Image (tube, helix red, strand yellow):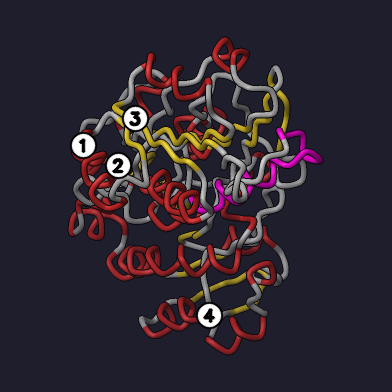
Amino acid sequence: MIIGVPKEIKNNEFRVAITASGVHEFIQHGHTVLVERGAGLGSSIADEEYAGAGAELVTDAAEVWGRADMVVKVKEPISTEYSHFRKGLVLFTYLHLAAEPELTRALLDSGVTAIAYETVQMGRTLPLLAPMSEVAGRLSVQVGAQCLTAPAGGKGILLGGVPGVRPANVVILGAGVSGTNAAAMAIGAGADVTILDINISRLQELDALYQGRLKTVASNTLEIERSLLGADLVIGSVLIPGAKAPKLVTNALVAKMKPGSVLVDIAVDQGGCFEDTHPTTHENPTFMVHNSVFYCVANMPGAVPNTSTYALTNVTLRYAVALANKGVAAALEADSALAAGLNVAGGQVAHHSVSSAHGLPLAQDWRQLV
């Protein structure tokens, strides 16, 4: 199989879908790897490293897309890349189709077989989303602390306070991978931290782990309002695999929050869990809603590409190699977790969450599509 790795072109996206060791792995299995020149520079991976591992360096992105049997990316394709779609192409990347109606339609119209990292599911875990959720969760506290500074429009609060001065009040919505990592960073910084979730068992685990240093609250609309009215920093990290995130924070509630408070929406890729969320970029990451600062960057881990690229490829490589070695149909048949990643194939929707989000018919059996 020919594996294509184009350079990411989303605003300020510096990650890359393969490392030199990944190239070496594909080559060892007899495959060809095309890497667009400069694709790894943002992650400190030089073209020479790819070439040394056996990759063929290609100058033109169109050639990478055109020659490849399978394109491996990090972020969902943007509109300028839709022209590269064609029947028979396999696309393996983050897609977030529930929040991307135009991309969904482009994939359906072209006949691409699209497998999404974020819906590969093993039991209740999302192994290809987890490392980026870890990065985003930890980064959310870092960027939130920066946004709380007065020059950034925030209230001018130091996250951990100082002796004699109260620390910031941090509220985290969702106790999944992102939320748990956000809590760890906020507690480590000395903040006063509360986490809300509907999963009581998960809250019990966190309560036992932090032994009183983390407040846990069963999530409902009243408790969310009570928590947010006193919050300095709110981190939204609610996830429903493959589906749009639930809107937990209304515009009316934001209007009641303390002036200078900050809201960071990690769930923006899936539409966001704040009513006023809209995707922003690292170039222009924030906007104001009433008197609060919203940070809604849709590719947060792209800000730390060196860490993110290696964390991501550590988990995606074995699935990509399986697809290349066995072909799509056999690879999905052999691995139910990977089969759950199939979102679109043969011009039909193959994932229930994408079907529900866009009101599109769901294929009854993916085996008839690939």
Q: What residue is drawn where x is 53% and y is 57%?
A: 73
- Crowd class of label 1 (few under 14; some 14 to 19; many from 20; radius 10 Å): few
Local SS, label 3: helix
Q: Are marks 1 and 3 in contact (CB under 8 Å)?
A: no
- Crowd class of label 3 (few under 14; some 14 to 19; many from 20; radius 10 Å): many
Q: Main secondary structure of the magenta part?
A: helix
Q: Are marks 1 and 4 in contact (CB under 8 Å)?
A: no
Residue 218 appearing in the image: yes
Q: Which of pointers 4 and 2 indicates the residue nearer the eye? A: 4
Magenta highlight range: 136-155
Image quarter in which the N terminus is found = bottom left
Local SS, label 2: loop
Per the image, the residue denoted by label 3 is 353
Please tell me the numbered disc located at residue 310: none
Please tell me the numbered disc located at residue 369: 2
Which amino acid, by three-letter code, is at mark 2?
A: Leu
